Protein backbone atom coordinates (compact mmCIF):
# COMPACT_ATOMS: atom_id res chain seq x y z
CA UNK A 1 0.00 0.00 0.00
CA UNK A 2 1.24 3.49 -0.85
CA UNK A 3 0.80 5.12 2.57
CA UNK A 4 1.93 8.54 1.32
CA UNK A 5 -0.63 8.41 -1.48
CA UNK A 6 -3.34 7.38 1.00
CA UNK A 7 -2.46 10.38 3.18
CA UNK A 8 -2.68 12.67 0.15
CA UNK A 9 -6.12 11.27 -0.70
CA UNK A 10 -7.23 11.57 2.93
CA UNK A 11 -6.17 15.20 3.21
CA UNK A 12 -7.64 16.06 -0.21
CA UNK A 13 -11.03 14.86 1.04
CA UNK A 14 -10.58 16.99 4.14
CA UNK A 15 -9.64 20.03 2.08
CA UNK A 16 -12.68 19.54 -0.15
CA UNK A 17 -14.98 19.29 2.87
CA UNK A 18 -13.60 22.49 4.40
CA UNK A 19 -13.72 24.21 1.00
CA UNK A 20 -17.40 23.28 0.87
CA UNK A 21 -17.86 25.03 4.21
CA UNK A 22 -17.32 28.31 2.39
CA UNK A 23 -20.67 27.71 0.69
CA UNK A 24 -22.03 27.48 4.22
CA UNK A 25 -20.51 30.85 5.11
CA UNK A 26 -22.02 32.30 1.94
CA UNK A 27 -25.57 31.04 2.47
CA UNK A 28 -25.55 31.78 6.19
CA UNK A 29 -24.72 35.39 5.33
CA UNK A 30 -27.05 35.59 2.33
CA UNK A 31 -29.95 34.38 4.46
CA UNK A 32 -29.19 36.75 7.33
CA UNK A 33 -28.77 40.01 5.38
CA UNK A 34 -31.59 41.92 3.72
CA UNK A 35 -32.58 40.91 0.20
CA UNK A 36 -30.80 43.92 -1.32
CA UNK A 37 -27.44 42.60 -0.08
CA UNK A 38 -27.68 38.88 -0.89
CA UNK A 39 -25.69 38.97 -4.14
CA UNK A 40 -22.93 40.96 -2.49
CA UNK A 41 -22.66 38.43 0.34
CA UNK A 42 -22.33 35.53 -2.11
CA UNK A 43 -19.79 37.33 -4.32
CA UNK A 44 -17.60 38.51 -1.43
CA UNK A 45 -17.29 35.05 0.13
CA UNK A 46 -16.19 33.35 -3.09
CA UNK A 47 -13.89 36.17 -4.23
CA UNK A 48 -12.36 36.42 -0.76
CA UNK A 49 -11.46 32.76 -1.18
CA UNK A 50 -9.73 33.58 -4.48
CA UNK A 51 -7.75 36.49 -3.08
CA UNK A 52 -6.90 34.45 0.04
CA UNK A 53 -5.45 31.72 -2.18
CA UNK A 54 -3.14 34.20 -3.90
CA UNK A 55 -2.03 35.82 -0.62
CA UNK A 56 -1.46 32.49 1.11
CA UNK A 57 0.35 30.92 -1.85
CA UNK A 58 2.79 33.77 -2.40
CA UNK A 59 3.31 34.93 1.19
CA UNK A 60 1.28 33.40 4.02
CA UNK A 61 2.08 29.69 3.83
CA UNK A 62 5.80 30.33 3.51
CA UNK A 63 5.68 32.79 6.40
CA UNK A 64 3.97 30.24 8.65
CA UNK A 65 5.86 27.10 7.68
CA UNK A 66 8.97 28.16 5.76
CA UNK A 67 7.89 26.27 2.64
CA UNK A 68 8.33 27.74 -0.84
CA UNK A 69 6.63 26.44 -3.98
CA UNK A 70 9.06 28.22 -6.30
CA UNK A 71 11.01 25.08 -7.18
CA UNK A 72 10.81 22.60 -10.11
CA UNK A 73 7.91 20.17 -10.15
CA UNK A 74 10.19 17.25 -9.32
CA UNK A 75 11.09 19.03 -6.09
CA UNK A 76 7.48 20.03 -5.39
CA UNK A 77 6.52 16.37 -5.20
CA UNK A 78 8.98 15.74 -2.36
CA UNK A 79 8.74 19.03 -0.46
CA UNK A 80 9.38 18.63 3.25
CA UNK A 81 10.72 15.13 2.70
CA UNK A 82 7.25 13.78 1.96
CA UNK A 83 6.38 12.03 -1.29
CA UNK A 84 3.35 12.07 -3.59
CA UNK A 85 3.09 15.86 -3.40
CA UNK A 86 1.78 15.75 0.16
CA UNK A 87 2.92 19.30 0.97
CA UNK A 88 0.83 20.69 -1.88
CA UNK A 89 -2.40 19.16 -0.63
CA UNK A 90 -1.35 20.19 2.87
CA UNK A 91 -1.26 23.75 1.52
CA UNK A 92 -4.76 23.30 0.06
CA UNK A 93 -6.08 22.03 3.40
CA UNK A 94 -4.53 24.84 5.42
CA UNK A 95 -5.59 27.41 2.80
CA UNK A 96 -9.23 26.51 3.45
CA UNK A 97 -8.58 27.40 7.11
CA UNK A 98 -6.81 30.66 6.22
CA UNK A 99 -9.59 31.68 3.84
CA UNK A 100 -12.12 31.12 6.62
CA UNK A 101 -10.74 34.24 8.33
CA UNK A 102 -12.16 36.76 5.79
CA UNK A 103 -15.31 34.60 5.49
CA UNK A 104 -15.82 34.97 9.24
CA UNK A 105 -15.13 38.71 9.19
CA UNK A 106 -17.52 39.10 6.26
CA UNK A 107 -20.49 38.26 8.46
CA UNK A 108 -19.75 41.15 10.80
CA UNK A 109 -19.14 43.86 8.20
CA UNK A 110 -21.77 42.92 5.64
CA UNK A 111 -24.35 45.34 4.19
CA UNK A 112 -22.08 48.42 4.34
CA UNK A 113 -18.49 47.47 3.42
CA UNK A 114 -16.94 48.71 0.16
CA UNK A 115 -15.80 45.92 -2.14
CA UNK A 116 -12.20 46.71 -3.17
CA UNK A 117 -11.02 48.11 0.17
CA UNK A 118 -12.29 44.86 1.69
CA UNK A 119 -10.25 42.90 -0.85
CA UNK A 120 -7.14 44.79 0.27
CA UNK A 121 -7.92 43.95 3.89
CA UNK A 122 -8.27 40.26 2.96
CA UNK A 123 -4.86 40.25 1.26
CA UNK A 124 -3.19 41.86 4.27
CA UNK A 125 -4.85 39.62 6.84
CA UNK A 126 -4.36 36.29 5.03
CA UNK A 127 -0.90 37.20 3.79
CA UNK A 128 0.55 38.63 6.99
CA UNK A 129 -1.48 38.73 10.22
CA UNK A 130 -3.10 35.29 10.28
CA UNK A 131 0.05 33.37 9.23
CA UNK A 132 2.10 35.19 11.87
CA UNK A 133 0.00 33.65 14.66
CA UNK A 134 -0.50 30.40 12.74
CA UNK A 135 3.29 30.11 12.48
CA UNK A 136 3.72 30.70 16.22
CA UNK A 137 1.31 27.89 17.09
CA UNK A 138 1.42 25.35 14.26
CA UNK A 139 4.71 26.26 12.57
CA UNK A 140 6.95 26.35 15.65
CA UNK A 141 8.16 29.86 14.82
CA UNK A 142 10.16 32.15 17.14
CA UNK A 143 10.35 29.51 19.86
CA UNK A 144 6.96 30.56 21.23
CA UNK A 145 5.67 27.04 21.84
CA UNK A 146 8.98 26.05 23.40
CA UNK A 147 8.73 29.01 25.76
CA UNK A 148 5.20 28.02 26.80
CA UNK A 149 6.31 24.45 27.43
CA UNK A 150 9.34 25.55 29.47
CA UNK A 151 7.29 28.06 31.47
CA UNK A 152 3.98 26.27 32.02
CA UNK A 153 4.78 22.61 31.39
CA UNK A 154 3.11 22.09 28.01
CA UNK A 155 2.85 23.82 24.63
CA UNK A 156 -0.36 25.51 23.53
CA UNK A 157 -2.76 22.86 22.22
CA UNK A 158 -5.11 23.85 19.39
CA UNK A 159 -5.80 20.72 17.39
CA UNK A 160 -8.14 22.20 14.78
CA UNK A 161 -8.15 25.95 15.31
CA UNK A 162 -10.55 27.17 18.00
CA UNK A 163 -8.14 30.05 18.52
CA UNK A 164 -5.82 29.91 15.48
CA UNK A 165 -8.75 30.17 13.07
CA UNK A 166 -11.98 31.11 14.84
CA UNK A 167 -10.87 33.46 17.59
CA UNK A 168 -8.52 35.14 15.14
CA UNK A 169 -11.38 35.69 12.70
CA UNK A 170 -13.82 36.83 15.36
CA UNK A 171 -11.49 39.28 17.06
CA UNK A 172 -10.06 40.60 13.77
CA UNK A 173 -13.66 41.53 13.01
CA UNK A 174 -13.86 43.76 16.11
CA UNK A 175 -11.73 46.48 14.52
CA UNK A 176 -13.64 46.28 11.25
CA UNK A 177 -17.10 46.40 12.85
CA UNK A 178 -16.22 49.22 15.24
CA UNK A 179 -14.53 51.36 12.58
CA UNK A 180 -17.38 50.82 10.12
CA UNK A 181 -20.13 51.76 12.53
CA UNK A 182 -23.67 50.45 12.63
CA UNK A 183 -25.91 50.00 9.60
CA UNK A 184 -28.24 52.90 8.85
CA UNK A 185 -31.47 52.42 10.76
CA UNK A 186 -30.08 49.88 13.22
CA UNK A 187 -30.28 52.24 16.19
CA UNK A 188 -32.77 55.07 16.73
CA UNK A 189 -31.59 58.48 17.92
CA UNK A 190 -32.81 57.67 21.42
CA UNK A 191 -30.68 54.51 21.46
CA UNK A 192 -33.44 51.98 20.83
CA UNK A 193 -32.48 48.92 18.82
CA UNK A 194 -34.45 48.79 15.58
CA UNK A 195 -35.22 45.40 14.05
CA UNK A 196 -33.53 44.60 10.74
CA UNK A 197 -35.04 41.30 9.64
CA UNK A 198 -33.17 38.56 7.78
CA UNK A 199 -34.16 37.94 4.17
CA UNK A 200 -34.33 34.15 4.05
CA UNK A 201 -34.43 31.75 7.00
CA UNK A 202 -34.10 28.62 4.78
CA UNK A 203 -30.87 30.05 3.27
CA UNK A 204 -29.61 30.77 6.80
CA UNK A 205 -30.44 27.21 7.87
CA UNK A 206 -28.85 25.74 4.74
CA UNK A 207 -25.65 27.66 5.47
CA UNK A 208 -25.55 26.26 8.99
CA UNK A 209 -26.16 22.70 7.78
CA UNK A 210 -23.37 22.92 5.20
CA UNK A 211 -20.97 24.25 7.83
CA UNK A 212 -21.95 21.53 10.33
CA UNK A 213 -21.34 18.74 7.82
CA UNK A 214 -18.06 20.19 6.57
CA UNK A 215 -16.85 20.67 10.13
CA UNK A 216 -16.18 16.95 10.46
CA UNK A 217 -13.56 17.40 7.75
CA UNK A 218 -12.31 20.52 9.52
CA UNK A 219 -11.81 18.66 12.80
CA UNK A 220 -11.23 14.98 11.98
CA UNK A 221 -8.89 15.58 9.03
CA UNK A 222 -6.77 17.97 11.12
CA UNK A 223 -4.91 14.80 12.08
CA UNK A 224 -3.11 15.35 8.76
CA UNK A 225 -2.75 11.66 7.93
CA UNK A 226 -4.66 8.38 8.11
CA UNK A 227 -2.51 6.98 10.91
CA UNK A 228 -3.35 9.88 13.25
CA UNK A 229 -7.11 9.94 12.68
CA UNK A 230 -9.27 9.47 15.78
CA UNK A 231 -12.93 8.60 16.29
CA UNK A 232 -12.79 10.64 19.50
CA UNK A 233 -12.56 13.82 17.42
CA UNK A 234 -15.73 12.91 15.52
CA UNK A 235 -17.62 12.00 18.70
CA UNK A 236 -16.56 15.19 20.47
CA UNK A 237 -17.46 17.35 17.48
CA UNK A 238 -20.92 15.77 17.36
CA UNK A 239 -21.65 16.25 21.05
CA UNK A 240 -20.32 19.82 21.17
CA UNK A 241 -22.47 20.71 18.17
CA UNK A 242 -25.58 19.25 19.80
CA UNK A 243 -24.80 20.94 23.11
CA UNK A 244 -24.45 24.27 21.36
CA UNK A 245 -27.68 24.08 19.38
CA UNK A 246 -29.78 22.87 22.34
CA UNK A 247 -28.41 25.55 24.67
CA UNK A 248 -29.06 28.22 22.03
CA UNK A 249 -32.59 26.85 21.54
CA UNK A 250 -33.37 27.42 25.22
CA UNK A 251 -31.42 30.66 25.71
CA UNK A 252 -32.67 32.10 22.42
CA UNK A 253 -36.31 31.14 23.08
CA UNK A 254 -36.72 29.05 19.91
CA UNK A 255 -35.27 31.72 17.60
CA UNK A 256 -34.12 29.90 14.42
CA UNK A 257 -31.12 32.18 13.93
CA UNK A 258 -29.82 31.42 17.40
CA UNK A 259 -30.48 27.68 17.04
CA UNK A 260 -28.59 27.32 13.77
CA UNK A 261 -25.71 29.50 14.93
CA UNK A 262 -25.65 27.79 18.32
CA UNK A 263 -24.65 24.55 16.62
CA UNK A 264 -21.73 26.40 15.03
CA UNK A 265 -20.71 27.91 18.38
CA UNK A 266 -20.48 24.42 19.85
CA UNK A 267 -18.31 23.26 16.98
CA UNK A 268 -16.06 26.31 17.27
CA UNK A 269 -15.50 25.60 20.96
CA UNK A 270 -14.43 21.99 20.53
CA UNK A 271 -11.86 22.47 17.75
CA UNK A 272 -8.93 23.05 20.10
CA UNK A 273 -9.44 20.08 22.38
CA UNK A 274 -11.41 17.69 20.19
CA UNK A 275 -8.60 15.12 20.28
CA UNK A 276 -8.05 15.16 24.07
CA UNK A 277 -11.29 15.95 25.94
CA UNK A 278 -13.84 13.40 27.12
CA UNK A 279 -17.17 13.42 25.21
CA UNK A 280 -18.96 14.66 28.35
CA UNK A 281 -16.51 17.55 28.48
CA UNK A 282 -17.20 18.28 24.81
CA UNK A 283 -20.95 18.33 25.46
CA UNK A 284 -20.50 20.78 28.33
CA UNK A 285 -18.18 22.97 26.24
CA UNK A 286 -20.81 23.11 23.52
CA UNK A 287 -23.56 24.04 25.98
CA UNK A 288 -21.51 26.95 27.35
CA UNK A 289 -20.60 28.09 23.83
CA UNK A 290 -24.20 27.95 22.55
CA UNK A 291 -25.65 29.82 25.50
CA UNK A 292 -22.72 32.21 25.50
CA UNK A 293 -23.31 33.04 21.85
CA UNK A 294 -26.93 34.04 22.48
CA UNK A 295 -26.15 36.23 25.49
CA UNK A 296 -23.02 37.62 23.83
CA UNK A 297 -24.95 38.57 20.70
CA UNK A 298 -27.66 40.30 22.74
CA UNK A 299 -25.14 42.14 24.92
CA UNK A 300 -23.14 43.31 21.93
CA UNK A 301 -26.14 44.62 19.99
CA UNK A 302 -28.42 45.80 22.77
CA UNK A 303 -26.02 47.14 25.38
CA UNK A 304 -22.80 48.01 23.55
CA UNK A 305 -24.59 49.05 20.32
CA UNK A 306 -22.05 47.20 18.19
CA UNK A 307 -23.67 46.13 14.92
CA UNK A 308 -22.03 42.78 14.26
CA UNK A 309 -24.59 41.51 11.74
CA UNK A 310 -24.09 37.73 12.03
CA UNK A 311 -22.65 37.84 15.54
CA UNK A 312 -19.20 36.67 14.46
CA UNK A 313 -17.51 38.26 17.49
CA UNK A 314 -19.35 36.09 20.05
CA UNK A 315 -19.74 33.12 17.69
CA UNK A 316 -16.16 32.74 16.49
CA UNK A 317 -14.24 35.07 18.79
CA UNK A 318 -15.92 34.28 22.09
CA UNK A 319 -16.62 30.58 21.53
CA UNK A 320 -13.12 30.12 20.11
CA UNK A 321 -11.51 31.77 23.13
CA UNK A 322 -13.63 29.61 25.43
CA UNK A 323 -12.58 26.50 23.47
CA UNK A 324 -8.89 27.34 23.72
CA UNK A 325 -9.08 27.85 27.48
CA UNK A 326 -11.50 24.95 28.06
CA UNK A 327 -9.05 22.54 26.39
CA UNK A 328 -6.74 23.32 29.31
CA UNK A 329 -9.47 22.26 31.75
CA UNK A 330 -11.31 19.33 30.20
CA UNK A 331 -8.15 18.02 28.54
CA UNK A 332 -6.63 17.35 31.97
CA UNK A 333 -6.66 13.76 33.18
CA UNK A 334 -8.42 14.91 36.38
CA UNK A 335 -11.38 15.89 34.17
CA UNK A 336 -11.31 12.66 32.18
CA UNK A 337 -9.14 14.05 29.39
CA UNK A 338 -6.06 12.63 27.72
CA UNK A 339 -3.65 15.04 29.46
CA UNK A 340 -0.57 16.68 28.00
CA UNK A 341 -2.00 20.19 28.37
CA UNK A 342 -1.55 23.05 30.80
CA UNK A 343 -4.30 25.46 31.77
CA UNK A 344 -1.90 28.41 31.91
CA UNK A 345 -0.44 27.56 28.49
CA UNK A 346 -3.96 27.45 27.07
CA UNK A 347 -4.86 30.75 28.70
CA UNK A 348 -1.71 32.57 27.62
CA UNK A 349 -1.72 31.09 24.12
CA UNK A 350 -5.38 32.00 23.62
CA UNK A 351 -4.97 35.57 24.89
CA UNK A 352 -1.92 35.99 22.64
CA UNK A 353 -4.08 35.17 19.63
CA UNK A 354 -6.80 37.57 20.77
CA UNK A 355 -4.28 40.38 21.24
CA UNK A 356 -2.71 39.86 17.80
CA UNK A 357 -6.18 39.80 16.21
CA UNK A 358 -7.40 42.96 17.96
CA UNK A 359 -4.27 44.94 17.14
CA UNK A 360 -4.15 43.58 13.59
CA UNK A 361 -7.82 44.26 12.89
CA UNK A 362 -7.73 47.88 14.06
CA UNK A 363 -4.43 48.45 12.23
CA UNK A 364 -5.57 47.02 8.87
CA UNK A 365 -9.06 48.49 8.76
CA UNK A 366 -7.92 51.74 10.38
CA UNK A 367 -5.23 52.23 7.76
CA UNK A 368 -7.63 51.48 4.91
CA UNK A 369 -10.31 53.73 6.41
CA UNK A 370 -7.86 56.66 6.60
CA UNK A 371 -6.60 56.19 3.04
CA UNK A 372 -9.27 54.62 0.81
CA UNK A 373 -12.37 54.60 2.98
CA UNK A 374 -14.19 51.40 3.90
CA UNK A 375 -17.88 52.21 4.00
CA UNK A 376 -20.46 52.50 1.24
CA UNK A 377 -22.00 55.91 0.70
CA UNK A 378 -25.32 56.52 2.41
CA UNK A 379 -27.11 56.37 -0.95
CA UNK A 380 -25.43 53.07 -1.95
CA UNK A 381 -26.20 51.56 1.44
CA UNK A 382 -29.85 52.62 1.07
CA UNK A 383 -30.18 51.02 -2.36
CA UNK A 384 -28.17 47.97 -1.28
CA UNK A 385 -24.76 46.59 -2.13
CA UNK A 386 -26.22 44.33 -4.84
CA UNK A 387 -27.18 47.21 -7.12
CA UNK A 388 -24.47 49.60 -5.93
CA UNK A 389 -21.57 47.19 -6.53
CA UNK A 390 -22.78 44.40 -8.82
CA UNK A 391 -25.57 46.12 -10.78
CA UNK A 392 -27.93 43.20 -10.32
CA UNK A 393 -30.34 41.95 -7.66
CA UNK A 394 -30.82 38.47 -6.26
CA UNK A 395 -34.02 38.02 -8.32
CA UNK A 396 -33.55 40.18 -11.44
CA UNK A 397 -36.32 38.62 -13.55
CA UNK A 398 -38.85 39.02 -10.75
CA UNK A 399 -37.74 42.59 -10.09
CA UNK A 400 -38.13 43.48 -13.78
CA UNK A 401 -41.64 42.04 -13.80
CA UNK A 402 -42.56 44.16 -10.77
CA UNK A 403 -41.55 47.27 -12.67
Image: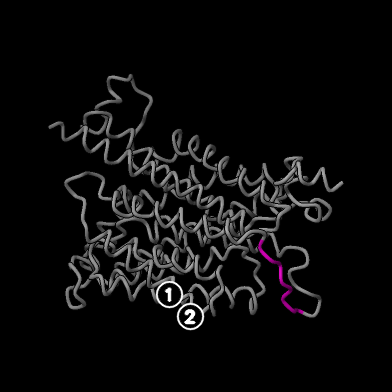
Dot 2 lies on which element?
helix
Look at the picture and state if 147 lies above or below 93: below
Residue 162, image x, y percentages: 38, 61
Residue 57, image x, y percentages: 44, 34
Number of callouts in the render?
Answer: 2
Q: Which quadrant: the N terminus?
A: top left
Rendered image coloring scheme: one colour
* 275 left or right, relative to 205: left
Residue depicted at x 45% and y 73%? 290
Residue depicted at x 63% and y 63%? 309
Residue depicted at x 63% and y 49%? 41
Residue closest to the eye, 287 or 79: 287
Q: Which residues are magenta?
A: 191-198
Residue closest to the eye, 212 or 303: 212
- Dots 2 and 1: beta carbons under 8 Å? yes
Look at the picture and state if 220 lies above or below 191: above
Instruction: Please name the residue that numbered disc 2 is placed on.
Output: 250
Q: Gap in Å between the C-alphas at discs 2 and 1?
A: 6 Å
Disc sitting over residue 246 in the figure: 1
Residue closest to the eye, 232 or 301: 232
Give neighbour class at mark 1: few <14, some 14-19, many 20+ (Cα, 10 Å).
many
Amino acid sequence: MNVAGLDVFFLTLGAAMVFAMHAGFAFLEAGTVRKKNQVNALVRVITDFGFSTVAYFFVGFGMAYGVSFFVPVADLNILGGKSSGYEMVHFFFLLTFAAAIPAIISGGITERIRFWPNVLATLMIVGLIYPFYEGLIWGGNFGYQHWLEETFGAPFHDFAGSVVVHSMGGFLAVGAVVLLGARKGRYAKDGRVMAILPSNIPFLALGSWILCVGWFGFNVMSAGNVEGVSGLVAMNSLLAMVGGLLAALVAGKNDPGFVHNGALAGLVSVCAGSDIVHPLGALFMGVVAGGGFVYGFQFLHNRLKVDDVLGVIPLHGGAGLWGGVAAGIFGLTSFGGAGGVSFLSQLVGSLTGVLIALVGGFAVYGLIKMTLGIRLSEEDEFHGADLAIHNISANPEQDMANH
